[in-house]
Amino acid sequence: MTHSHGDEELNKGSISLSGAVGMGTGVMIGAGIFALTGQIAQLAGPYFALSFVIGAIVTSFSAYSYIKMSNAWPSSGGIAMILQKAYGPGAIAAAAALLMTLSMVISESLVARTFATYVLRPFDITDGLLVPILAVGVILFAFLVNISGNRSVGLLSIIMAVIKIGGIALFGIVALWAGGFTFPAASSVSNEFTTTGFVASVALSILAFKGFTTITNSGAEITNPHRNVGRTIMISIAICVVVYLLVAFAVGSNLSIDQIVAAKDYSLAEAASPALGQFGFYFTVVLAAVATASGVLASVFAVSRMLAMLTDMKMIPHSHFGMPGSIRSHTLVYTVVLASTLAVFFDLSRIASLGAFFYLIMDMLVHWGVFRSVRHEIGANGAILLTALAFDAIVLVAFTMMKLDSDPLIVLYAAIGIVVVFVSERLYLSRWTAPQIDAGNKHGKK
């Protein structure tokens, strides 16, 4: 049986600029608003809206590396290409790419559980067996849409992005008006919030923006990729900044910090009740279902292509387990199984924390690798690359300190996961780094 993957299988130009923006915002808004607002408020207190702003600034610096590399070498599974170009086909590049893939799978399970939490909220169900069952259900739905082809994903992403961005904007404006454009007085618990807690909250804010990596992973399939990959990333981040701030102020106008923290897994629905009444509550639930479903859809698309590219680059082992079809169809199955497993066994807070650890480590390796090996070749500014690296390091240290105090087990899980990934890749590839491949020839540099 023959199994293959490669650029010859890609539907080049099958994703338009608007479709790519829809996918990018689909991942970001699905996770950022509905899954993370309450968790960020728990760490940042009355300054949770500012946390989104700082997260956007850090993300913009991070995006610089990806834009520069993707403009030069757009590719499906673009982050794998970036890392291999920076470190060569060795264990460092493979492990970092695998961490990125795992963080994306984690995001899928995070958003899927958020979908379940909001859908069940009208029935006063906040826990129990139905939450993971619904979460797995929406992941399977995303699998079915993805298996039908790229154009189905792009079209559905555009439709869902328009619905949710318009709906969230309407919610934010009306909720702000109903709340009198003022924040209620923070309760006494806000005195417990510290500078370290605020910096740690930025780690989760960054997760709310990291969906831009979905775009780099689909680079070869975007129309006019040498130009549109960078444009898509910046447009998506800009849209999300506006949406996040609008919602943060809307929630803050209707709920105290204590109330936001208490309802952290469904804070938008809770904020809609005083602002818009029962209709607003149900409107927000439907909006959350659309937004999170599209987030899972776009993320499954990106992760499956990332895994396929890692396989094509011989960076991870592959077994088809008797399944027919191409490697890409196999990686869709692997993605769904992994995300479903996480959605069943982890709650929202731990899923988000694990994703933050994996993503920040990978992101730092990207910046260092680009600075170390290819910044002159692609015309990148070294100061910007080092600034992005420093921002990530500061946020990672603060987040680790907070989690060691509040949930040391998740730090242990993350550390074990990172060590296992690096050791496994070192055993598989037998070297940490290697001479850089000619990614321009392999991935179609102009």
Image (tube, rainbow, N blue to C red):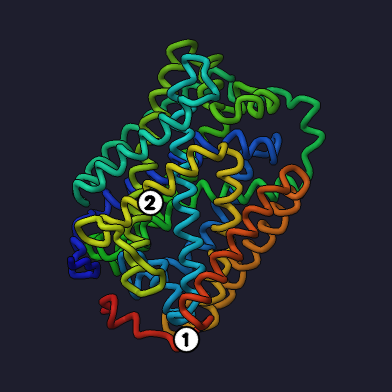
Residue 155 placement, left or right of 249: left
The one of 52 and 435 positioned closer to us in this rendering: 435
Hey, which quadrant is residue 267 in on the image?
A: top right
Q: Which quarter of the rendered picture does the C terminus lie within? A: bottom left
Specify which label sits upstream in the sequence, 1 or 2.
2
Residue at image x 47%, y 84%?
Answer: 376
Residue at image x 47%, y 75%?
Answer: 428
Residue 419 placement, left or right of 406: left
Hey, which quadrant is residue 185 in on the image?
A: top right
Residue 344 against residue 171 in the figure, above or below: below
CA separation in Å, label 1 and label 2? 28 Å
Return the residue at label 1: 434
Mark 1, residues whose alpha carbon is within 10 Å: few (<14), some, or many (≥20)? some
Question: Horizontal and vertical percent for residue 283?
Answer: 41, 20
Return the residue at label 2: 335
* Camera-nearest label, 1 or 2: 2
Give, as a three-letter code, the residue at label 1: Ala
